[in-house]
Image (cartoon, rainbow, N blue to C red):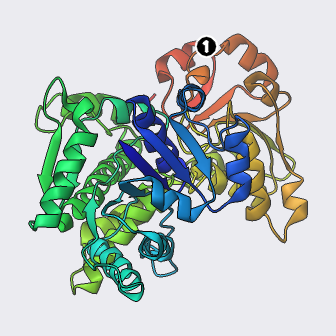
Amino acid sequence: MKVTIIGSGYVGLVTGACLAEQGNNIFCLDLDPKKIEILNSGGVPIYEPGLKEMIERNRAAGRLQFSTDIAASVAHGDIQFIAVGTPPDEDGSADLQYVVAAARNIGRHATSPKVIVDKSTVPVGTADKVSAAIKEELEKRGQPADLCSVVSNPEFLKEGAAVEDFMRPDRIVIGTENTPAGLRAKEQMRKLYAPFNRHHERTYYMDVKSAELTKYAANAMLATRISFMNELSNLADLVGADIESVRQGIGSDSRIGFGFLYSGTGYGGSCFPKDVSALSKTAREHGRDLKILDAVEAVNELQKYILVEKIEKRFGNDLKGMKFALWGLAFKPNTDDMREAPSRVIIQELVKRGASVVAHDPVAMPEAKHCLESDFKGNPDGLKRVSMVDSPMAALDACDALVIVTEWKAFHSPDFEQVMQKLTHPIIFDGRNLYEPSAMKELGIEYYGIGRHN
C-alpha cells in the first residue's frame, strides 16, 4: 500500500520504518530540511534501538523515502498519517497548530480519496478539527467535501522499545465514523494492519472520540501508578519500610500486576507530562476537574527533587566546593530524550547549592548539552560547573558521592571496589533502586535508595 507519513519525528519515523518493513511504499514528509538531509544521508536524528538499521534496510529496498515536498507527499499516499508534534501550550493544553497545518496542506493538494490518520497524540475532538480544516481547503478548490475521511489511530510506543512495540503490539486502536466514508476508511486500515493480526486479532475498532480518549487514558493510568508508588516510597522512608517488599506484595495481586510499580525520581519524556496535563485541561474545558490527575502531576514534580532532599539531609544545604558524579541523563534508558528529564532538575538544584556535577550517559550527552545550555541560560557560571565524560567510572574521579538517575543496564553491575576507590566518600544516592541496601552495607558503601530501608 502507498502510505504518507507527515512528520519525521519519533512517532513518524518508527511508524514509517515499521510499515515499510511490511512491504508498504512509504513517503515520509518533514518541513525541516536539516532533518530530511540527515535521513537522506543515512543518519537518524533520534536514538531508538533497531530503528537506524530498519530505515537503512528499507531505503535500500526502495520502500522508504524522505522529502520536504508537500505536494508530492499528498499525491503519494492513499493513507496519510499525521504524526507531527503536539507540544504543550502555556495553559497545559496540546498545541494543535502543526496538526491543523498538516490537515490544511492535504486539503490544498488532494485530488483523489484519502484516508487521514491522526497518529499524533491529540485531545478528544481533534478529528473534527482536522476534518473541518481539510473540507474547507477542498471546497476552496471545488473538490468534493467528502473526498477525505479522518481516522484516529493513536500510538502506544514506549521510547527505547518502540520498534518492538510497533511490530508486536499489545493492541491497535482504530477509531472511525459510522458513515459510508468511515466504513471505507476502516477497511483500508484493516488491510494496512493485517500483517500485525495474523496470529490473533489485536485491533479494537471504536468511534473516533473513544479512540482519542483511549490514548490519554492509557498514559494517565500509567503515570498514576508511578506517582502512587513514589508517594508510598516516600512514606516507606518515614516509617522504616522497604518499598521493594511492598512492591512485590501488591504486584503479586493479579488485579494489580507489577507493571509501572517502581519507585524513582519521577517520570519525564515527551508523553506522560504533556498527556496528563492535556487530559486535565480537556476536563476543565468541560467543567470537570480530574482531581486524581492533578495530584499525579503535583507528586511527580515534587519527586524530581527527592534525591536533592536526601543529599541535603546528608551534607547540609550548602554544597559549595562539593562535586557529584551523576549516572544517567535521559529520562529513561535506551533513549536520548531529555524532555522533562529529572536529571535536569537535579543538576540545576545541585549547582544552585554550590556543587559541581560530572555526568555520564551512554547515549543522551549530546542532547543533554543542548538542554542544559537552555536550562542555564543567563547563568554561564553555573553551566561551567557541569561537565560530561565518556565513561561511568571517569565520572567518579574525586567526587564526593555518586547520584544515579537513569537505570541504564551499564549501571546495574559496576565494579564496586573501583567505585569506592574513585569516590572521595563511598556514598551512593540511587534514584532507581538498582542495588540492594544490605549488599551495599556489606561493601561499606553508604547507600540511599528511594523507600529502601537499610
In this view, the residue in front, 106 or 75, is 75
Residue drawn at 46 percent across, 81 percent down: 91
Count residues near mark 1 (Cα–Cα under 10 Å), then give few for <14, some for 14-19, many for 20+: few
- Read off the residue under disc 1: 443
Q: Position of residue 266 (x, y in %)?
A: 47, 50
Q: Position of residue 116 (x, y in %)?
A: 33, 62
Residue 242 seen in the current view: no
Which of the image's four quarters has the N terminus? top left
Q: Is residue 391 above or below residue 284?
A: above
In this view, the residue in front, 146 or 431, is 146
Q: Secondary structure at mark 1?
A: helix
Q: Is residue 426 above or below residue 151?
A: above
- Horizontal side of 441 relative to 289 (left or right) equals right
Residue drawn at 37 percent across, 77 percent down: 134
**The disc labelled 1 sits on which kind of residue?**
Leu
In this view, the residue in front, 121 or 350, is 121
Image-quadrant location for residue 339 = bottom right
Residue drawn at 26 percent across, 52 percent down: 218
User: How many numbered discs?
Assistant: 1
Residue drawn at 43 percent across, 43 percent down: 15
- Horizontal side of 76 relative to 359 (left or right) equals left
Q: Position of residue 145 (x, y in %)?
A: 28, 80
